[in-house]
Image: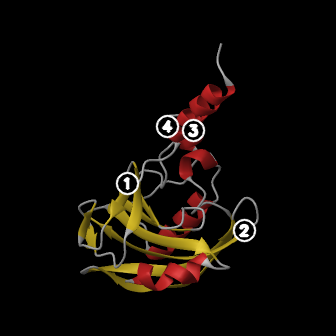
Amino acid sequence: MIKNREIILLVVVFLLSACTHYTLVEPAKREMGGGYSVEPQIVWNRSVQGKIEIWTIDGPALAAVHFFNGIGDGQNLYSYYGKSSRKAKLPKFNKTMTASEVLEFIVDSMMAPYPRSLVGPNMIGTGVQTHQLRPFKFGSHPGFRFELSFLSEEGLEYEGFVAGVIKDDKLFLICYSGTREYYYPKYKETAEQ
């Protein structure tokens, strides 16, 4: 006969095994997906989901940096659907896109019907607004940058910025976003560096 304490222990073990695995990122130069390098100023927690690295301190629902490392021609921003028919309807990157077309691709991808459990609580939402699209030096390459705001599915307000470049026919992005109320401004300067 299983006791209540054993049931609770089994539930805790199951829940922990379902959680995303994080490792520490120390303040030292890091190569990112063969396309560029970054030098974090503080310690972050890192999770890898395919070609996406997510760095956070207080949790990805509050504030996070997303590194999209080498989205190829014809690929989706998030690639969680495998070969399903739903994936065919999602926005696809095209290596000939201009900066404004990449902006639209990102916005359309953020508002696409991804399962929240697969994409995570940050960088998907509704009511996405963008502004200040401009040229931006991405490492040693000419890239672009823009600011954005959006709402989570629950109506929580987020702010963020996206910097990117198309290099060797692949899209590389750094996206920082956080809750407008407290976390976005808390780590914005650090994320900028």
The residue at which mark 3 appears reads as: 15
Q: Amino acid at mark 1?
A: Asp
The residue lying toward the viewer, choosing from 43 and 141, is 43
For image coordinates 25% across by 67% down, the residue present is 30
SS class, disc 3: helix
SS class, disc 1: loop
Labelled disc at residue 156: 2
- Give the mark toward the camera: 1 or 4: 4
For image coordinates 60% across by 39% down, the residue present is 86
Labelled disc at residue 73: 1
The x, y position of residue 19, in whole percent, is: 52, 44
Measure how far apart labels 1 and 4 are at the Cα level: 34 Å
Measure how far apart labels 3 and 2 are at the Cα level: 25 Å
Measure how far apart labels 2 and 4 are at the Cα level: 28 Å
Q: Amino acid at mark 2?
A: Leu
Q: Quadrant of residue 63?
A: bottom right
- Give the mark toward the camera: 3 or 1: 3
Measure how far apart labels 3 and 4 are at the Cα level: 5 Å
The x, y position of residue 163, in whole percent, is: 42, 76
Contact (Cβ within 8 Å) of mark 3 with mark 1: no
- Give the mark toward the camera: 2 or 1: 2
Q: Is residue 34 visible?
A: yes
Q: Earlier in the sequence, mark 1 or mark 4?
A: 4
Contact (Cβ within 8 Å) of mark 1 with mark 4: no
The residue at which mark 4 appears reads as: 17
SS class, disc 2: loop
Q: Quadrant of the C terminus?
A: bottom left
